Amino acid sequence: MFRVDLRRLILLLSITAALLTLINSFYVGYQVQRDLLIQQTLEANRVYAAKLAESTEGLLASARQQLAYSAARLPALLEQPQQLAAETERLKQQTDTFNSAYIVRDDLTLLAISPAMLLPAGSLLNSAGARESLEKRQPLVSAPFVSTAGKLVVMISQPIIAADGRYLGYVGGSIYLRERSILNSLLGEHFYRDGSYIYVVDQRGQLLYHRDAERVGEPIHSNLAVAAVIAGQAGSQQIVNSRDIDMLAGYAPVASTGWGIVAQRPTANTLAELDGLMLSILRNALPFSLLSLLGIWWLARLIAQPLWQLASSARQMDSQTAPGEIRQVGAWYFEAAELKRALIAGLAQFDRKIGKLNLDTLTDPLTGLYNRRGLQLTLEQWQARTQPFAAVALDIDHFKQVNDNHGHAVGDLQLQHLARLMRESSRGGDVLCRVGGEEFLILLPDVDLATATQVAERLRLRMETCTALPCGPVTLSIGVAHWPDSAAAIDRVLEMADQALYTAKRNGRNLVVVAPSERQPSDASLS
């Protein structure tokens, strides 16, 4: 009769728990990273689409302004063919906005066009855009249409109105949709290399721009992003596009025209890097997992339950739960009880040594202030949460002379006395550091430059008037800077505080100097 003994039971439970933990950790890690990547990509595409929509809006506004200026000049020139030709040439050549510019009379007769080779003056225009401009008699950005010259275009037009209010025709400019144009330049230069791309639709869902020029003019149906953006909505969502490809799309409308800009990336491209990463993690984890299972099997054959439990806990001595797990072990015989007691004592001593070691690695042994490692750790934490702060760099004047004339013991007393004054002059959240021999740094969170300068000045005066040191009064040179008001980079702010300190040295010492800001006023206000 087969019996499940303790060794087999421990082995079975251990293997099952290890595999379930590995699978669960792998699955949870994958899902969390997957959701994070998708959300980040959606938000990036939304922001990017909004930026391009704003740029496109600016481009169209500039084009309307050019045409409005021209339309105001044209009523007096309609009977002067040379002047009309010159005006269309000016519109065409002055900027890269239009592929062609033209002036049309109210009977759809072409009066002038640039480039002149497209159509002869006097031609009758019968395109959809020409008729739409004539019918509406107002500033217009047309729907895509095929021009009389055979180009797929969008036309921007401005009515020409006489002084007595009569409609005389319109001046317009065409932007080619399938050839090089200002619209293609604006949108095409932002093409991503990671599978992302953008496209533009008009208010009917017809493509105005696409990386595949052959698709320009094609209507887009059954696309949730297109439906949302032509309804005037901005946002992002995961969709299946018209080619049945799963996409992460961000979109934003161009309000003045009803166009919509969509920036999207295939979901598969976004997750491809994650798939490779998770496979790499799995490959690296498998050898260690197999070794762990073999170790459990070997231990289960050699030891009884109490020793196995203690050994299992010992392998996790760096875990916060290890002391509690060891205390719960049922040590029912002498050797197990002694090992349990020794492990508990060892963990307690280990915790004490680790705590002391962590403190020693972050502080200066002479002054008890943070050292450079402690300073760097603080700066990384503050930068992560964008914590504004003032940096006060201090240096004891003529410190080398004190060491030379009075000995290093007196010099150490000076350093310790300055550290004590820094503590007395600071708040609980301030960070005090010794960054060099006689060089110190104070970081003051949520303090502006004016307040930090006052703190520095008080500390300078207290040090200057001190009579307790055997070498007599001591003076300080101090530099003050602020992040982010003085500069955008934290390292640069610390460098500026140090430079201000040396400016104080050059100007006679025993001074507080504020570093001049490198940021424009508008930048500082935005910070």
Image (cartoon, rainbow, N blue to C red):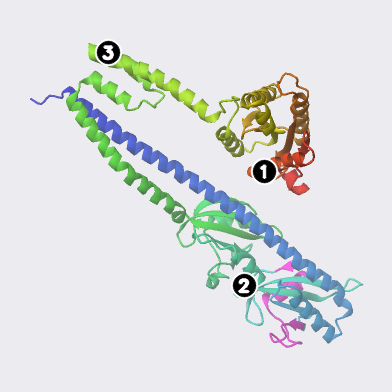
Check if residue 171 falls in the magenta segment: no
Q: Residue furthest right?
A: 164
Q: Distance between the residues labelled 3 and 2?
A: 84 Å
**Residue at mark 3:** 337
Please state the extent of the stretch shown in magenta in the rendering.
Answer: 112-141
Residue at position x 53%, y 57% from top?
264
Q: Name the residue under label 1.
A: 495
Report the amino acid beneath label 2.
Leu
Query: Mark 3 or 2 closer to N-term?
Result: 2
Residue at 64% across, 59% down: 52
Q: Is 132 on the left-hand or right-hand side of 281?
A: right
Nearer to us in this view, 270 or 439: 439
User: Which percent across, then down, holds residue 331?
Assistant: 26, 14
Q: Which mark lies nearer to you, 3 or 2?
A: 3
Residue 109 seen in the figure: no
- 10 Å crowding of disc 3: few (<14), some (14-19), many (20+): some
In the rendered structure, the answer to whether residue 291 lies left or right of residue 361 reads: left
Tags 3 and 1 in contact by the CB under 8 Å rule?
no
The three-letter code of the residue at mark 1 reads Glu
Mark 1 lies on a secondary structure that is helix
Badge nearest the viewer, 1 or 2: 1
Q: Earlier in the sequence, mark 3 or mark 1?
A: 3
